[in-house]
Amino acid sequence: MTLLTKDEICTQLGVSPRCLENMITRGDFPPPTRLGKKNFWTDTALQAWLARFFHAQEVWQPGRR
């Protein structure tokens, strides 16, 4: 298991720290786990969130005419 910091999450998602905080507050992104003075997410949690976020796009099929 790999632990990711807020900066690493923001870089991977291409969002600002403030945007990430807002996503967490709205319940759109998993809350961090605090270890000492820092917050962390597991790479597994990030991958699961990405899979759920992009699910509709990945299962999309063109409509029939």
Image (cartoon, rainbow, N blue to C red):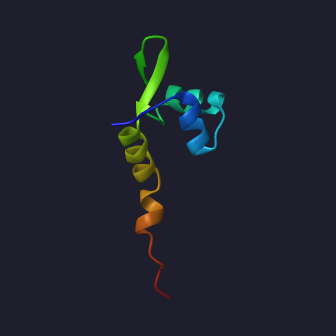
Q: Point out the residue furthest to the front here.
A: 2
* Residue 53 position within the rendered picture, expressed as x and y whole percent measured from the top left: 46, 50
* Residue 25 position within the rendered picture, expressed as x and y whole percent measured from the top left: 52, 25
Q: Is residue 2 above or below residue 34?
A: below
Instruction: Quadrant for residue 60, please give it.
Output: bottom left
Tell me if residue 8 can be seen: yes
The residue drawn where x is 42% and y is 31% is 41
* Residue 19 position within the rendered picture, expressed as x and y whole percent measured from the top left: 63, 33
Q: Nearer the viewer, residue 23 or 11?
A: 11
- Is 14 positioned to the left or the right of 56 in the image? right
The residue drawn where x is 61% and y is 40% is 11
Q: Point out the residue furthest to the left here.
A: 1
The residue drawn where x is 66% and y is 34% is 16
Q: Nearer the viewer, residue 18 or 5?
A: 5
Tell me if residue 31 can be seen: no
- Is 15 positioned to the left or the right of 34 in the image? right
* Residue 15 position within the rendered picture, expressed as x and y whole percent measured from the top left: 64, 39
Q: Point out the residue furthest to the top here.
A: 36
The quarter of the image holding the N terminus is top left
- Is 18 positioned to the left or the right of 55 in the image? right
Instruction: Please state the total of marks drawn on the protein image.
Output: 0
